[in-house]
Amino acid sequence: MHASLHDSSLLFTVAGDLLSTNVATVRADLLTALDRHTSATSVVVNLSAARTVDSQGLNLLISLLRECERRKLELRITEPQSQVHRLLSYLNLASRFGLPALVAS
């Protein structure tokens, strides 16, 4: 996972799937970066490399959303794989992460 500050946005690039096997490490990295970059006004999570998000990965994203709300930061997910985007839409979470809802076919 890579974290960097661009203008006032903290950009997280997730290196792979968000699974129970790696969420503890990803969560620690996210919180460390949030604490380090206190001047950020928004958080952007690039999920282009995450083909799969399991229940623990989803829990991580929801926890990050709550943490951003607590810190008064805007949170957006960018470039989700189609199956991840479908999952977030199915759970009515897409708009909470700044994504358009997908229309069921």
Image: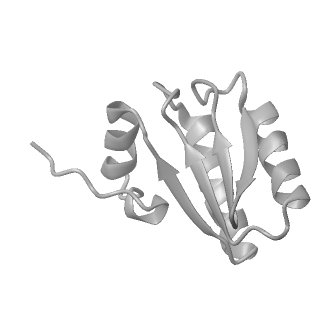
Find the residue positioned furthest to the bottom: 72
Vertical arrangement, residue 22 with respect to residue 13, above or below: above
Image mark count? 0
**Quadrant the N terminus occupies:** top right
Task: Tell me where residue 77 appears, x and y as whole percent.
Answer: 50, 51
Colouring convention used in this rendered image of the protein: one colour
Task: Tell me where residue 24 appears, x and y as whole percent.
Answer: 79, 34
Find the residue positioned furthest to the left: 105
Find the residue positioned furthest to the front: 7
Q: Nearer the viewer, residue 72 or 24?
A: 72
Q: Residue at x 66, y 50 (%)?
A: 11
**Quadrant the C terminus occupies:** top left
Quarter location, residue 66: bottom right
Quarter location, residue 27: top right
Q: Nearer the viewer, residue 56 or 71?
A: 71
Q: Residue at x 69, y 78 (%)?
A: 72
Q: Nearer the viewer, residue 80 or 54?
A: 80
Task: Tell me where residue 48 appears, x and y as whole percent.
Answer: 48, 33
Q: Residue at x 43, y 39 (%)?
A: 80
Query: Horizontal placement of 82 versus 56: left or right?
Result: left
Q: Residue at x 16, y 51 (%)?
A: 103
